[in-house]
Amino acid sequence: MAGCATAPRQDFGAVPEPGPSFVETTVTPDTILAPPPESAPVIVPLVSPATTNPPPSTLRNAPPESVPVVETWVPLPRWCAARGLTGLTRQTNAPQPTYQVPLPQGLLVLRAGSLVAQFHGVQIRLGFAPQMIGGQCYVHSLDLAKTVEPLIRIADSPVGLAGPIILLDPGHGGPDAGTRSVLGGNSEKDFTLDWALRLRELLIAQGWQVYLTRTNDVEVSVAARTQLADALKAALFVSLHFNSSGNSHSESGLETYCLTPAHMPSSLTRGYPDDLKASFPNNSFDVQNLQLAVRAHRETLEALGAVDRGVRRARFLGVLRPQHRPAILMEGGYLSHPTEARLIASRAHRQKLAEAVARAIGGPRQQVAENKP
Ligand SMILES: [Zn+2]
């Protein structure tokens, strides 16, 4: 992600004004395990673990804006029972135990005190670390509504219901080269365009009408990228990037981003304000965003065997926030990592990247048909 620090003006359209620095704020294991920052919610269990009352209303309906949802925690066993999910198991008796929740499409693994969850072998960053209260695991209602519920429905939720048009966004372009490969030669802008062109051909074969925000080496503003999506009435928006950890050559792997839901802390802020109360047009697609991100991330991980750096959420990504459609941003590997940079420079590798994303997206018409009652 820091690779884009070389060109902050075009860094996914990050808000330009306040950014004090573009220092990489990669989430390390320490920060993963740390309690949530200033936004740390007061733990207010809605339901006593001993009661047999029905689940809190927040489980049945999305909380209205006026409700201070950041103070809502739900006991995991009670929530599983309310959702008809059986098989919840506690894996360890450690002070910060791990829980396994069998969902219809895969196993969800939650760890008390950790922002890192696993679903069907894919790492997903939570907004709040689950808490142990009275020997029982509590999960934040926003994570249940915005992360776990979408995973329950991930198989029957089409990603492109609004039509057959998809807009691919090869990151950077023109004087904004993005990050440079540690091997020299090409830059991020070259590889993102090649990835998008390969993906275009595959998606056309799958029934999509595919547009790109750029088809050659030109600079395109963030505003132009998002306005094009509206002009096209695109059903999906997929932004493609490659990563960098600056002078460190040790980090590698895949990250996939979607917009942070309102009231939830972001996985990554890069020094920008992370206004939890902020709500953007793309927040109307919180569920579909996560589903698309998880699908794309899993397919890509499986295809490449790369390091899993997780499905993450960020609020500063300007190309995602204004989108009136499901939208994700993929970081397809580290150009600062010599081995990964060598792979990314290979056409065969970039073809694998394109094929993985195409598999994740599927075809629009088929999905529309499947969704009809
Ligand atoms: Zn980039």
Image: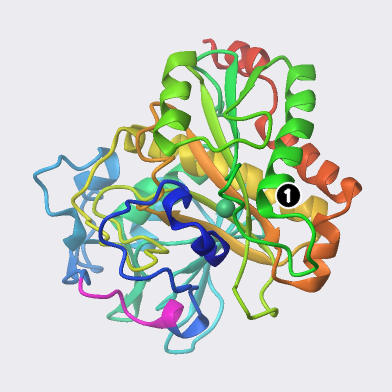
Nearer to me, 311 or 327? 327
Which quarter of the figure has residue 371? top right
Q: Is residue 21 above or below residue 31?
A: above
Q: Amino acid at mark 1?
A: Thr
Nearer to me, 231 or 276? 231
Nearer to me, 10 or 201? 10
Name the residue located 53 percent from the left edge and 66 percent from the top edge: 2
Query: Crowding at label 1, few (<14), some or many (≥20) Cα neighbours within 10 Å?
Result: many
Name the residue located 57 percent from the left edge and 63 percent from the top edge: 3
Coloring basis for residues: rainbow
Residue 73: x, y in percent? 25, 62
Which residue is identified by label 1? 300
Q: Is residue 107 above or below residue 325?
A: below
In the picture, measured across the screen, residue 333 lies left or right of residue 149, that is: right
Residue 349: x, y in percent? 86, 50
In the picture, measured across the screen, residue 113 lies left or right of residue 368, that is: left
Whether residue 196 can be seen here: yes
Q: Does the magenta portion include 32?
A: yes
Q: Is residue 161 above or below residue 76?
A: above
Q: Is residue 45 above or below residue 322?
A: below
Q: What range is drawn magenta here? A: 31-38
Name the residue located 25 percent from the left edge and 37 percent from the top edge: 61
In the picture, measured across the screen, residue 298 lies left or right of residue 27, that is: right
Q: Label 1, secondary structure: give it.
A: helix
Residue 368: x, y in percent? 58, 14
Residue with the most extreme left position: 66
